[in-house]
Image (cartoon, coloured by chain):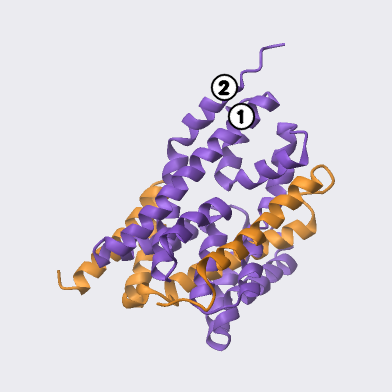
Chain colours: A orange, B purple
Amino acid sequence: MTGGEHAGYLVLLAAAAATFVWRALGAVLVGRVDPEGPVVRWFTLTSYALLAALVVRLVALPTGSLAGIPLAIRLAAVAVTLGVWWLSRRRVLPAVLSGSACIVAAALWLAGG
Amino acid sequence: MPEVDTRSAALAGLRTAAGVPLLLVSGGMAGFGALAHDIGFAAWEAVMAPVVVWALPAQVVAAELHAAGADLVAIALAAALTSMRFFPMAVALLPTFRAGGLLSRLLQAHLMSATSWAFVMRPSAPREPRERLAFHTAFTLTCIAAAAVAAFAGWLGAAALPKPLALGLLFMNAAFFMVLLAESRNRQVLLAVALGVILCPPIHAVLPEASMLLAGVLGGTGAFLFGDRLRS
């Protein structure tokens, strides 16, 4: 994976500026805006839908090395992550580590090790 | 009136950060570091990301879109949509510091993260505004320092660890976000998540570069328009 056409630091500065805009807006408009209003709600819902699409892309349509792991195994790792999260009473680290362990085990198996 | 003790408050912030928050931040940022290596970022760029962006979703979105060949405007737009949450968070958090100058407010707004917000809003955090400011500053600086180290460790891991372990690190990005999304109890938010998941693949088949942004905007708008009665 070689990546896009821009230097990495430019990509990160674009992300930094895009993030800082919201932080700064909050710092400037303190006390003058309703954090529960409809505009804020639309942005919140959109950011959740965008994160969901990000997960779909990372799992189902990966651009990098994860593409070497079969889709069925990636989906199984998703099931394990969410399953462990549920069974461990919503604990984040055990869930994340179990899902990643699935990928490691599958990669070892695929490599014939 | 009790004496203001910013020194103890700062120490308390450091101690509070050096537990579960540090583990969560390090795990997420190690995954990002591995992704950064996978898409060809230099080590110093991976380390710089948590310091200047300090928002894992924006960092991962930017890296992912960059790898897909998107241009800077599309990357900034998508990153902005994931970082919107900082606006209401800042509006709620900053008044509790009563920090006078705009510069001080901007600094705290940059240091703030979803984790620091949750911890400084807990009843066990200091009450006095100046102590809260010291607590929050120490808490967030500890987290950012750990994040930079973890991003470097993840980058090194992806470069030097055996391939299966590097792939496991890489998968942590997706795993963190799916747990974050599953944690939501609000049904309107869950509708937005479901729409984002359903809409992404068909859009991706037609417009691969814009699939994340379009699925986000359409899914969010759909949940906004049709999910009003689901609000609880």
A67 or B181: nearer the viewer: A67
Crowding at dot 1, Cα within 10 Å, few <14 / some 14-19 / many 20+, comes out as: many
Name the residue that disc number 1 marks.
Answer: B134
- Relative to A5, is A9 above or below? above
In the rendered structure, which amino acid carries the disc numbered 1?
A: Ala
Quarter location, residue A41: bottom right
> Percent position (x, y) of residue B140?
55, 40
Mark 2 belongs to chain: B
B119 or B49: nearer the viewer: B49
Query: Marks 1/2: CA distance?
Result: 7 Å
Camera sees residue A99: no
In the rendered structure, which amino acid carries the disc numbered 2?
A: Arg
Q: In the orientation shown, which residue stands out farthest toward the left?
A: A113
> Percent position (x, y) of residue A77?
35, 65
Camera sees residue B97: yes
Q: Same chain, marks 1 and 2?
A: yes
Task: Mark 1 and mark 2 in contact? Answer it, CB < 8 Å.
Answer: yes
Name the residue that disc number 2 marks.
Answer: B7
> Percent position (x, y) of residue B126?
62, 25
Crowding at dot 2, Cα within 10 Å, few <14 / some 14-19 / many 20+, comes out as: few
Query: What kind of element bears circle 1?
Result: helix
Residue placed at 66% from the left, 17% from the top? B4
Residue placed at 71% from the left, 38% from the top? B104
Q: In the orientation shown, which residue stands out farthest toward the top?
A: B1
> Percent position (x, y) of residue A97?
34, 54
Residue placed at 45% from the left, 77% from the top? A61
Left or right: B217 as drawn, with respect to B32? right
